[in-house]
Amino acid sequence: MPSRASLASLRQLGEFGLIQRLTQRIGRAGPPVLLGIGDDAAVIRMGPGRLLLLSTDLLAEGIHFDLATATMEEVGYKAAVGNLSDIAAMGGEPQYMLVALAIPAWRTVADVDELYRGLLRACRRHGVHLVGGDTSASPRGLFICITVTGISKTRRALTRDGARVGDLIYVTGTLGDSHAGLKLLRARRKPVSRAPGEGQRRNVRFLVKRHLRPTARVPEGQWLASRRLATATIDLSDGLSGDLGHLCTRSRVGAEIETASLPLSPACRWYARLLHRDPADFALAGGEDYELLFTVSPDNRRRVDRLAQRRGFRFTRIGTIKSRKFGIQVRPPTGPPHAMIPRSYRHFQHLGPTAGPGEA
Ligand code: ADP
Ligand code: MG
């Protein structure tokens, strides 16, 4: 008879509860698997000074993308970047890609051509070769599953588990733009009811582009790995509030984020103000930034700042690693700090009220 626990619905267990359960069931692999489930990519030793990185992502229409607001080309491009970003977070060089598709029969050949135009464009940009995949009909909606491999020539890959109390927390680029861009796409790119001026149109274009054409921070990741400057790294796919939580859980630490330090683009600030929202909320809760979050020992702070500036990287210090007991807190510019609530997307728990056969 199935145990009580196994009768729980996935909605009750949640995405991360399910992954935890699978992790226990699968168990640890022996060498040469240096790292299995639990990070942005698996790490396998292929020989002296040569690590293979493996990552896969499944994107479902209606959950990860909406073909009413993005073209097939944009969906393809972004799907590839999401995967490349996981290799970037491990400090690796992406190499090969496999693409599996489940697609409704009524879709046209031109749809698939467009999708691959986006995928191949992202691959070319990063010197990645698309070497295979799989094709199936889908009874409903488009599904894209991408697997990417990378290599790391450093002794250790960048992982989520190396942050120590006192380390400084950094992020690349700016945060919240993608969330703002998504909101704009849902509002049909209309920020206000009256006709927007050129400045506003420029902001709209910037934010929408940040959502549809994110950047995988591959050079930044490789740079951090080769200089051994990061103690822990994760890419921000689900939103800072959720992904920082994953890094802290793996590193068994807490963190404090200063909202005044969050890097926000002028366009993101503008749009948040227009909606009477705090742009820091976009940065904390919004997903799909595909920036890197990494931690640095305080001894290396000056080196990181100096070398990053010389290299032209935009790195911003946003907080400090604290003890696990401290938890994860957000310190606003005024007023007391408060606990950071993970508000990122959770699969199975964002599907609305529809009950399945076993649910009340
Ligand atoms: P990311 O957001 O970086 O893609 P995920 O949150 O999807 O990471 O996954 C976290 C970890 O759990 C990864 O190491 C991933 O390989 C693993 N994982 C996720 N789903 C499964 C699954 N169905 N079976 C085995 N491992 C999984
Ligand atoms: Mg990731």
Image: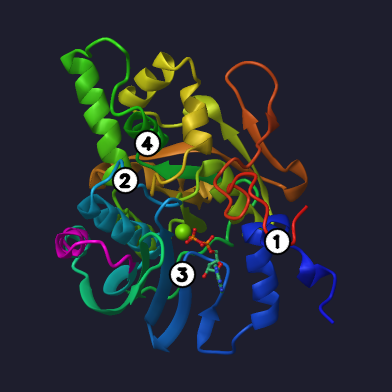
Q: Secondary structure at mark 2?
A: helix
The reply to whether residue 146 is in sight is yes
Q: Residue furthest top?
A: 194
Count of number-bearing discs: 4
Q: Residue 22: x percent and y percent? A: 65, 74
Q: Residue at x 41, y 46 (%)?
A: 288
Q: Which residue is mark 1?
A: 357
Q: Residue at x 64, y 82 (%)?
A: 26
Q: Residue 325: x percent and y percent? A: 78, 46
Tell me which numbered mark, 2 or 4, is placed earlier along the sequence.
4
Mark 3 C-beta closer than 8 Å to ligand 1: yes
Q: Residue 17: x percent and y percent? A: 69, 62
Q: Nearer the viewer, residue 249 or 204?
A: 204
Q: Amino acid at mark 3?
A: Ala
Tell us which disc is closer to us: 2 or 3: 3
Q: Residues within 10 Å of mark 3 (few under 14, many from 20)?
A: many
Q: Which mark is residue 182?
A: 4
Q: CA distance from mark 1 to mark 2?
A: 54 Å
Q: Which mark is residue 308?
A: 2
Against 114, residue 315 (above or below) is: above
Part of the protein shown in magenta:
103-117
Q: CA distance from mark 2 to mark 4?
A: 30 Å
Q: Amino acid at mark 1?
A: Pro
| Residue 275 colored in magenta in the image | no
Tags 2 and 4 in contact by the CB under 8 Å rule? no
Tags 1 and 2 in contact by the CB under 8 Å rule? no
Q: Secondary structure at mark 3?
A: loop
Tell us which disc is closer to us: 3 or 4: 4
